[in-house]
């Protein structure tokens, strides 16, 4: 505050300027400050030096010190680097203001236009460490005392805009409010400059302003003409934001934030939310700032069921339009979700007001995101050049759950300013454009983990921010289309959408190549003569020969003698799916009858694309060929394991004996060799699994085109039909089950539970025993164990799942419970809520241990904590307002003990803050990983829908145009094969992502089980009841099972890595 004895009006205006919380108050107080000092706002960096020289005020000295330190960096050349450059910035969002600040520091004249007249967005932005350090270096704490105190890593958009606006005004940026940028006005003749077309009528000074750099930061809906934009589309995604009044009471300050919790790894929390409130979400985030800010992703069916949406419309704009959203129902929805997520600890939730005085809650669509194909252009007319650049959302629309928007927006602002500096130095347009596009290629890959660790060194020079920087990744010749010399008025160009046209002829190969490959693979097998891609496969022998060539050892060719065509074909289809990962798109009946030649060609095309690079010699394929995706195989085995587990729990396998071939295909175990027993006849799969014949969907009964066919258990479905019967979520291998009672398919979250039994009642249905990597999930290498080495008979294999009581000593239990786990004493199941910051701090502390709970030497641990805090963006002198976050008593006690025994009690707050910050970072990293997976899965689903539509067109053309020239038909078949190859590639990527989902799921389950086990172990043994001991044993058995499953995944990933490494070395050889 101002000194009590100060009578200088400039001092009072400066204090008002610092404390102003409304845009109009900032402008009026700054105008008053300039008038009191006899200065005019704007005019560039000289204004800052005049204010600093004339305002001899103690309260301003710390701010001047920070700004002087930034402006004194060599890259700015004392404000002369761009002294002759004139810039126009469109948009006063965070990215536009940050770009304007950098340009002003370079010495450029900067004019900024903004169509709004106030800042009203309460939504909260996640900040990366470098953005926190960057804003602190600009004096953020001086303008907003609560900025990122302690472990906070976020700020509301409104507060961020306010503090950047204040910095921009001090640095002489000229700002015009209520001015909407319409377009560019090219120079009418030589010697004139570029102007902006603005509405409404701009003042004469602004209308006559000529500039040679335009930076657009006006949001994703406005991209200047000439820029091409690509749409990245996923399936329907509806976000809901809500801001509640923060009264800053003691109770509210104790409520812990939720950096992010996602259904993809914490299904129990969202299931509890659904049961308690009827609300079905994919994720939820809670930040505490000026408001209590919640953002979540809701499911459309839930919004329709709860009356938030009046009617279901296929058009997203109409679905979420104001006429279709019921405001009162939306408010109830958001309030109930927020209340549940915070356990009702926020008390009565009152909505904050938006810019129009209405409750600040809204639903928005983030199904598709736009990304500019280039970040900059140069236009020239009558010898006058204009540099155009994009920053912020009009460059790349961020995916909000990842929290990358403002961080990458700031990086783009720095890169844009660096380009202006290079432009001002006289570097050629093509060289400047090439450098900028080289930087743009890095932007979407940036994360806190892959940038320079020392954020204090970050500056305008890209080399200070990006490791392994290559400014020549894009050559000048590649950006010639971005340099446009206008001979006439520019032509408006439509944005490029995702290419959905017919695929060009690519590497999938022709029918002749496919036929030749099949002949080579089946050559030498008795009775097999492949002359075409239809009738030669009707007896099933050719298909069996192909499978045997790729996986020798499953059977001997002599065993096929006397086997019927349908039996042999059924066996080949099933083994190819279970052992090679080749999902059938045609039924055995159709292959034998020759009724679906296109389906057979597509199926063989899958073999070709997966194994075409393998050697022809039998036995070498499994060691050197990548084949199909190992993740597809792994998930398929996981799904069949889940089905067997549920069958056992429901008693379905009590009587009767499965055919041997079905057992081999469904249950290849580490204990049993895949080689068939001699003398046992080959038996085909049950007939019901061939029902549907591939032409009709087993669920809806409608026609199935080849690209639409999703096969499972011998049946075919539309991908859109194969959804959870309860929540309509897409089902993925390893994540669903079929209920034996009603026959419907369910996701694991909604799969009806079997009745309670004496054994197995403790099994989590969402935790099937994972197949181990040696179950042929990967092509076995030379070191794969043989059946003789394992020495386990099939009989012992079948009795393996029998559960026996596990007896561990107390030290063994303690060692198991401290195996790198995270407890949370604040949570009591059910439900499983998001982990608290205290629990995450415990995990961060335990991350300092190695082995079975054995700590490192204390000096090493303390030194590591201190070193990490020194490298963090926090400043100890600015932590006076840090909110106290409670830690678990044992964690707090451990830190205190270490501090006392080491004689460094003064460092205790530093260690404590480091643990909490590390905990938040890990929570956010995990949430971002889950959301990135979810987004990519959605994009894959959208891409598959597009492929299905294209495949349907091609298939209709092939089936109906019997009179078309043969050359045209061959082209269509080639295009169909290319689409099949694209689909298989996407499915393989999808399976790999689902493996990661399993990892996240198991990690979360292990953490929750550890929490429960700690609760039992912390009780005195004498006070435990028999029920307590039984429950403790059940939790311990579950924990052991989950640890074993995680071990299976780890070994699978390692074998896959080694296989890929061996393949890479083989390719080099």
Image (tube, rainbow, N blue to C red):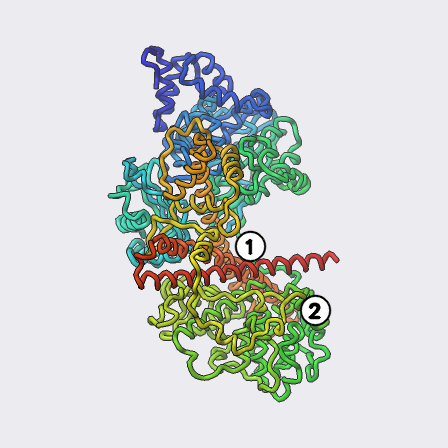
Pick out the residue farthest to the front: 1022
Q: In the depicted view, which residue is nearer to us: 211 or 856?
A: 856
Q: In the depicted view, which residue is nearer to us: 454 or 6?
A: 454
Write down the residue under mark 2.
620
The total of numbered circles placed on residues is 2
Left or right side of 509 for 48: left
Left or right side of 225 for 610: right
> Residue 778 at x, y = what percent?
60, 65
Write down the residue under mark 1.
499
> Residue 809 at x, y = what percent?
44, 59
Q: In the rendered structure, which disc, 2 or 1, sits on the residue that comes first in sequence?
A: 1
Q: Quadrant of residue 924?
A: top left
Q: In the depicted view, which residue is nearer to us: 707 or 783?
A: 783
> Residue 850 at x, y = what percent?
52, 48
Q: Secondary structure at mark 2?
A: loop
Residue 315, visible in the rendered structure: no
Pick out the residue farthest to the bottom: 562
Q: Residue at x 58, y 41 (%)?
A: 440
Find out whether the residues at labels 2 and 1 contact each other: C-beta distance under 8 Å. no
Question: Marks 2 and 1, Cα distance to the nearest angstrom?
Answer: 39 Å
Label disc, if present, on residue 716 of the rendered structure = none
State the quadrant of the N terminus: top left
């Amino acid at each position: 505050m101002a000194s009590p004895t100060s009578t200088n009006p400039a001092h009072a205006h400066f204090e008002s300027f610092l404390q102003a919380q409304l845009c109009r108050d900032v402008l009026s107080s700054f105008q008053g400050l300039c008038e009191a000092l006899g200065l005019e706002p704007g005019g560039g960096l000289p204004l800052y030096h005049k204010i600093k020289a004339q305002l001899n005020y103690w309260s301003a000295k710390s701010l001047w010190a920070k700004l002087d330190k930034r402006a004194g960096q060599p890259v700015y050349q004392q404000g002369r680097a761009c002294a002759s450059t004139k810039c126009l910035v469109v948009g006063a969002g965070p990215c536009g203001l940050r770009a304007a600040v950098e340009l002003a520091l370079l010495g450029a004249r900067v004019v900024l236009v903004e169509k709004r007249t106030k800042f009203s967005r309460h939504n909260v932005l996640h900040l990366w460490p470098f953005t926190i350090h960057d804003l602190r270096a600009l004096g953020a704490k001086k303008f907003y005392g609560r900025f990122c105190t302690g472990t906070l890593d976020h700020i509301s958009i409104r507060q961020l805009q306010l503090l950047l606006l204040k910095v921009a005004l001090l640095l002489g940026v000229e700002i015009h409010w209520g001015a909407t940028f319409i377009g560019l006005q090219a120079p009418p003749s030589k010697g004139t400059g570029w102007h902006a077309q603005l509405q409404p009528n701009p003042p004469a000074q602004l209308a006559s302003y000529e500039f040679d750099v335009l930076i657009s930061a006006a949001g994703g809906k406005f991209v200047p003409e000439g820029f091409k934009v690509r749409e990245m589309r996923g399936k329907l995604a509806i976000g809901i934001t809500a801001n509640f009044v923060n009264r800053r009471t003691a109770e509210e300050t104790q409520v812990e934030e939720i950096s992010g919790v996602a259904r993809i790894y914490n299904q129990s929390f969202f299931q509890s939310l659904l049961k308690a409130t009827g609300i079905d979400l994919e994720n939820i985030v809670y930040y505490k700032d000026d408001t209590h800010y919640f953002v979540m992703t809701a499911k459309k069916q839930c919004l329709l069921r709860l009356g938030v949406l009046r009617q279901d419309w296929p058009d997203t704009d109409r679905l979420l339009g104001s006429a279709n959203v019921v405001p009162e129902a939306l408010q109830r929805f958001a309030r109930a979700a927020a209340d549940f997520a915070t356990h009702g600890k926020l008390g009565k939730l009152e909505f904050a007001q938006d810019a129009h005085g209405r409750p600040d809650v809204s639903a928005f669509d983030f199904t598709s995101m736009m990304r500019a194909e280039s970040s900059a252009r140069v236009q020239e007319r009558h010898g006058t050049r204009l540099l155009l650049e994009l920053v912020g959302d009009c460059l790349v629309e961020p995916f909000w759950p990842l929290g990358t928007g403002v961080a990458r927006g700031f990086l783009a602002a720095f890169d844009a300013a660096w380009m202006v500096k290079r432009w001002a130095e006289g570097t050629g347009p093509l060289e400047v454009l090439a450098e900028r596009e080289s930087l743009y290629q890095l932007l979407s890959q940036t994360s806190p983990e892959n940038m320079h660790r020392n954020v204090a060194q970050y500056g305008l020079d890209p080399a200070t921010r990006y490791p392994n920087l290559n400014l020549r990744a894009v050559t000048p010749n590649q950006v010639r289309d971005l340099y446009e010399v206008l001979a006439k008025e520019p032509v408006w160009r439509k944005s490029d959408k995702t290419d959905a046209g017919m695929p060009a002829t690519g590497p999938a190969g022709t029918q002749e190549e496919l036929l030749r490959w099949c002949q080579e693979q089946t050559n030498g097998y008795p009775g097999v003569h492949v002359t075409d891609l239809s009738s030669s496969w009707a007896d099933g022998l050719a298909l069996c020969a192909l499978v045997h060539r790729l996986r020798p050892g499953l059977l001997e060719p002599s065993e096929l003698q006397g086997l019927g065509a349908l039996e042999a074909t059924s066996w080949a289809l099933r083994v190819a799916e279970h052992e090679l990962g080749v999902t059938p798109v045609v039924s055995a009946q159709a292959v034998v009858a020759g009724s679906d030649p296109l389906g057979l060609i597509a199926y063989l095309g899958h073999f070709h694309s997966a194994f075409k690079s393998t050697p022809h010699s039998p036995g070498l394929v499994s060691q050197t060929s990548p084949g199909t995706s190992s993740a597809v195989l792994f998930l398929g085995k996981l799904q069949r394991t889940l089905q067997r587990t549920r069958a056992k729990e429901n008693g379905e396998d009590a009587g009767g004996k499965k055919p041997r071939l079905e057992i081999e295909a469904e249950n290849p175990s580490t204990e049993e060799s895949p080689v068939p027993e001699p003398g046992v006849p080959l038996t085909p799969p049950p007939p019901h699994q061939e029902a549907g014949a591939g032409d009709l969907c087993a669920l809806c009964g409608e026609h199935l085109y080849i690209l639409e066919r999703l096969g499972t258990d011998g049946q075919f479905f539309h991908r859109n039909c194969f959804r959870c019967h309860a929540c309509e979520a897409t089902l993925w291998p390893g994540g669903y089950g079929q209920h034996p009672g009603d026959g419907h398919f369910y996701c694991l979250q909604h799969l009806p539970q079997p009745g309670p039994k004496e054994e197995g009642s403790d099994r989590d249905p969402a935790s099937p025993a994972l197949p181990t990597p040696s179950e042929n999930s990967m092509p076995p290498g030379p070191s794969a164990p043989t059946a003789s080495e394992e020495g386990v008979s099939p009989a012992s294999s079948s009795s393996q799942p029998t559960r026996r009581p596990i007896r561990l000593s107390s030290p063994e239990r303690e060692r198991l419970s401290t195996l790198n786990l995270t407890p949370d004493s604040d949570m009591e199941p059910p439900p499983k809520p998001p982990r608290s910051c205290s629990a995450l701090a415990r995990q961060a502390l335990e991350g300092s241990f190695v082995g079975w709970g054995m700590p490192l030497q204390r000096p090493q641990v303390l030194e590591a904590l201190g070193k990490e805090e020194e490298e963090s963006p926090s400043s100890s002198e600015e932590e006076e307002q840090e909110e106290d976050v409670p830690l678990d008593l044992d964690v707090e006690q451990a830190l205190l003990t270490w501090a006392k025994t080491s004689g460094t009690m003064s460092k205790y707050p530093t260690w404590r803050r480091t643990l909490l910050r590390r905990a938040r970072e890990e929570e956010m990293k995990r949430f971002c990983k889950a959301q990135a997976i979810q987004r990519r899965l959605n994009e894959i689903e959208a891409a598959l829908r597009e492929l299905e539509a294209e495949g349907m067109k091609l298939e209709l053309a092939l089936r109906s145009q019997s009179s078309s020239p043969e050359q045209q038909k061959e082209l269509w078949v080639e295009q169909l094969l290319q689409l099949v190859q694209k689909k298989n590639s996407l499915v393989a990527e999808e399976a790999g992502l689902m493996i990661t989902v399993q990892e996240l799921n198991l990690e979360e389950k292990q953490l929750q089980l550890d929490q429960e086990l700690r609760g039992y172990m912390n009780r005195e043994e004498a006070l435990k009841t028999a029920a307590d001991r039984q429950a403790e044993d059940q939790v311990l058995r579950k924990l052991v099972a989950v640890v074993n499953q995680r071990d299976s995944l780890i070994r699978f990933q390692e074998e896959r890595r080694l296989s890929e490494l061996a393949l890479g070395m083989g390719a080099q050889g």
